Image (cartoon, rainbow, N blue to C red):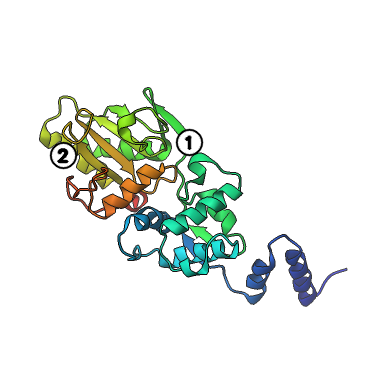
Amino acid sequence: MKLTSSAAALAAAVLLASLPGAAEATAQTTSGKALPSVNMEALVKAAQIDPRRSDTKLTPGAKASVLLVERALRDRHLLDKKWVDGYFGTTTVAAYAKYQKSLGYKGLQASGLPGKTSLVKLGAGRFKVTHIITPGARVHIGKYVINTRTRSMLNEAQRLLGRKLVLDQGSYNPGGDPTSAGTHDGGGVIDVNVKGMSSATRTAVARALRRVGFAAWVRNPKQGNWPWHIHATAINDTDLSSQAQNQIGDYYLGRNGLANRGPDDGPKVTIRTWEEYKR
């Protein structure tokens, strides 16, 4: 039997309503309104910067996305309503980490930094996710492991410089170097060997790395128990360790990424992510 258009619409609504967690999606569908969007790039940026602030200033362009995520966490009883404020501070990070753990995630996947899979699940029937970021598969550069997003960034920095860079350390290296204070435990982090480079060349390398989306600094032996090298952390890499996330936040706030949180001593460039650079 052929259904009339009104009967077909009613049948579709009944079918949607029978699906788990579909009540809101049904309301959105029958009302003809599109789901709101969470900009993942802006959201992840806020999750790195806001916890490092001494004030409650919001990360530009992130408020609407953060609010949508905070409301979803509130409705799951993971975040008190007083923290639904558009500020992705330490309380929201902790709530998101609880949500990730509720999905069975551990380690890097439960750090409180939103990843694609957890964010899409959180938004089911509530919001759609745009400007998606993924670190990609893990790959080898010589004896070191990094992810494909980091490799693309490194390749572009080398193209800008017109020279190949040699790594002293890669990513996903838990406990590999105690002087790194956990920054290399996750993805998105590399150390560049500067042997034979002049001061001007070291600065040029750090500048190129910053241009393509790394928070990069020239490190010297006076700052810690390490040789001269360039430390670079990829902004918005969703595999970052908590320590590396803190470095990104400090970079945006004009600091040096070290424990002393001193002023940024690197070359001045416009701060942008890899995705912003490509656009």
Q: Which mark is residue 137?
A: 1
Locate residue 46: give its quadrant: bottom left
Instruction: Name the residue tied to disc 2.
Output: 203
User: What percent of the width, then of the height, locates residue 265?
Assistant: 17, 45
**Nearest the camera: 191 or 81?**
81
User: Which comes before the other along the chain, label 2 or label 1?
Assistant: 1
Residue sticking out furthest to the top: 143
Locate residue 78: give its quadrant: bottom right
Q: Residue at x 28, y 45 (%)?
A: 215
Rendered position, 115 above or below 74: above
The quarter of the rendered structure image containing the N terminus is: bottom right
Q: Is residue 127 visible?
A: no
Q: Residue at x 75, y 72 (%)?
A: 9
User: What percent of the width, then of the height, locates residue 81?
Assistant: 52, 69
Q: Mark 2 is on which residue type?
A: Thr
The answer to whether 132 appears left or right of 266 in the picture is right
- In the structure shown, which secondary structural element does the residue marked by tag 1 occupy? loop
Q: Residue at x 23, y 29 (%)?
A: 226
Q: Residue at x 29, y 39 (%)?
A: 232
User: What percent of the width, then of the height, locates residue 202?
Assistant: 16, 35
Q: Is residue 193 visible?
A: yes
The answer to whether 159 appears left or right of 27 in the picture is left
